[in-house]
Amino acid sequence: MKPFLYFTGFVIFLFLVLFMPYDWWQKPPAKQPDKLIGKILPFLNISIRNILLRAFFLGFMLLIYLLSIIWVPIIAGIVITGAILRSVYLRIRGRAAEPVTGLIMLLVIGSIFIIGIIAPLRTVPIAGYLLLGKPAGNFWEAMTVGKGWMTMDGIIGLCGIFGVASWMLLDAVWRFRQARQVENLATSKIGALGMGLVEIQGKVRPVSGIGAGSVVELNYSMFDYLKPEQRISKFMLDDGTGTVLVDATECRVRAGWISEVASIFGVREIVLTRRITRDEFTDGVRKTLEFGDKVYVIGNAERAQSGDLVLRPASRPGWNEVLWKTLFGAVKPPKGRDIHDAFFITDGDEKGAKQHILKGFRTVLSWGLIWIISSVAVIWTAQQPWRQAPPPDSWRSAYWRGPEPNPNPMVLDYTRNDRLFRFEKYIKTVGPESYNQIPALIEAMAYKDYRFYEPAMWALIKMKPKVKGMAGEVVPILVSHLHSCSYNAKALQATILALGRFGPDAEEAVPALVDQLKCEKTDTYEVTPNIIRWQAARVLGEIGPQAREAIPDLTKALNDSSAFVRDAARQAIWKIGKGSASEDQDKKKGPSWIRLPRR
Amino acid sequence: MKPGLLIIPAILCGLLAIAGVGYLISLFNSLIQVRNNIGKAWHNIDVLLLQRNEEIPKLIDVTRAYVQYEWNVLESLTRLRTLYLTAGRTDQKTKIENELKQKMQGLKAVWEGYPDLKANELFLKLQQRISELEAAIAERRAFFNDTVTIYNIQREIFPQVIFAWMLGFRHHPLLVMLNEKGR
């Protein structure tokens, strides 16, 4: 039923979000400064509808990614192992191949990275577990508690710090260095362009003929926040002194913080801010760079094979070597390339370029810090004692989020059995002087399942001195368990015995105990009806004068078939009468005597 | 404090230390880069300056046949050209180039007094060649001067000034325009 309700809720939510009527609040508040959203959230340049859309589809996509991420290490492992074997084979044959050590390191580092990605995701169930007061018997506990998780979280945290966070910080450093290039480079004239890293400003011109349309285009909508579509063509840059070919086909167009995080390794970026069109309905965004637009470029100027001057990202060796060099220090760059390898295009000016790069720097740095913080949090929690196992009283209502114990033991419920298993483990730790456990025992006694309340009663019986003063709290619970003796007589016996511990304070139980005097049939040979009647009579005697109303039934019990019952009834009447006699004596200033009938 | 809790301040301190050291390294690298940029920008212009300087002896030879008194101008031009070829650092070369340009201005004034010289075909050809090279140099001069200005600003602002002082980074002169000085 619950999954159906959740599904229906999601569908209604999606329907509402998708088909909300267009209104003032749907439009960017910057265009509607006099409206409510503009006043409350002036910095928010997006409609609430589109925020909800993004949240929904991003959550949906993340869920898909999360489900598929389990397979990534396996697939990556197979692919890289295949590459290693291929490399070894090629080397044996004396042919050029990828360096095997690099591939092995890639396998190791790739594994560290993939494990580290999980770090912030691990904080979600751990935080949920703590915020919800360490709930037992549900998803949160299954995702948090256990020695296996502790070890795993330690590894995840360390991989998060030394894998993902380090990589992000490295990426942030790259971006910072790129921003430095904007400061440090003087703008070159294309007519007198030197080789190497240069900064140029000019207008976009077609490579040949008359250009029309866009040279760079980016599209994303609610279905591809994580992987926007981009199309980049080569173009000529004209600054009035000459033209140079710009080849940015291997670059990435920035699509906002979501894709920034999804493709964290890209420092060769194109940031477009001038020509942006939004589709409010699908939350789609289209960014373009068109012929005639002014652009600012930082890139590597070099001679193409044709001899023409071309501006492009500095050529790099293979991806595994890049990783190797990035992690273990850059080696001397190939001749003619610039070590800084910065590449950046924006349709703004120099100042805007620096701002865009720094924005990317801040985004990546923030995510890097989030990764570090979550990784540290995961490591820290992995050292906490509560992570080792659920708390001993995790079966209690304060923690338990599973189903309530079903009094019928024939009903099979593994979750409930888990709770019972915890209780059985717990009850073994309760001794005659575990007085601080009394509230837990009382709670256990309140459950309708005898497998809880019976052991709890036995434990409570052992704590007579302390328990005696808690009659007001305990006796009503015990009375509620005084059911018919034809069902679960053992539990009934424990209840009657427990009541006996309270003596006169168990007055409330007298009518129910009187009913037990009529017990004729039990469900077990271990506790016969005679035993139940005998215990009931005995406890009525323990209660004393307050059980006066039981005397007629006790008198009847004097004719019981069991000698034990008769004797107990006689003694009970005597005790009740003795108490009454002393009361009468107090009142009448003289003794009284009750003659007990004999059989 | 529990040993487990020490890991958080330890990691934070480590991060701050890395960030601090990283920032200092970035400042140092930045200074080195802007200094090297001057070298790159100079190489860009040096090719043309050398070509122009190659033409100077020829021009002097033609001029020497006509002029009677202004030998000192011609001698100083020859001396500066030789100095330029032997100079190692870009700031020295820049100073020499500026001086050379000043003397070239002086030479121009000399030519004004000799109409016969101005009518010489070889002289006109050489002058034309030098003018073309000067135009090309002028295009690259702006880029070089921008690069030098960035360097000069970087070495003077705080905290880069500390590194600049420690490493002995000196002020770099700009290349003057042809008609800026010597007028």
Image: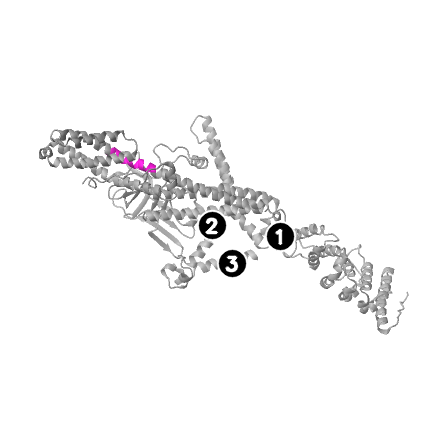
Left or right: B130 with respect to A85? left
Residue identified by numbered label 2: A61
Q: Quadrant of residue B69?
A: top left
Left or right: A547 with respect to B157? right
A116 vs A555, nearest the viewer: A116
Q: Quadrant of residue B158?
A: top left
Magenta stretch contains residue B44: yes
Q: CA distance from mark 3 to mark 2?
A: 19 Å
Q: Tell me the kind of residue under disc 1.
A: Gly
Q: Which residues are magenta?
A: B35-48
Horizontal and vertical percent position of residue A44 = 41, 57
Quick one: label 3 or label 2, which is nearer the N terminus?
A: 3
Residue identified by numbered label 1: A137
Left or right: A422 with respect to A175? right
Horizontal and vertical percent position of residue A176 = 40, 44
Q: Nearer the viewer, mark 3 or mark 2?
A: 2
Q: Tell me the kind of residue under disc 3.
A: Thr
Left or right: A398 with respect to A115? right
Does the rendering let one see residue A248?
no
Q: Residue furthest right?
A: A598
Q: Residue sitting at 20 percent across and 37 percent down? A: B102
Instruction: Give the answer, above or below, for where A9 lies relative to A150.
Output: below
Horizontal and vertical percent position of residue A99 = 45, 31
Horizontal and vertical percent position of residue B166 = 38, 37
Q: Tell me the kind of residue under disc 2.
A: Met
**Labels 3 and 2 touching (C-beta < 8 A):** no
Q: Quadrant of residue A526?
A: bottom right
Label 2 residue SS? helix
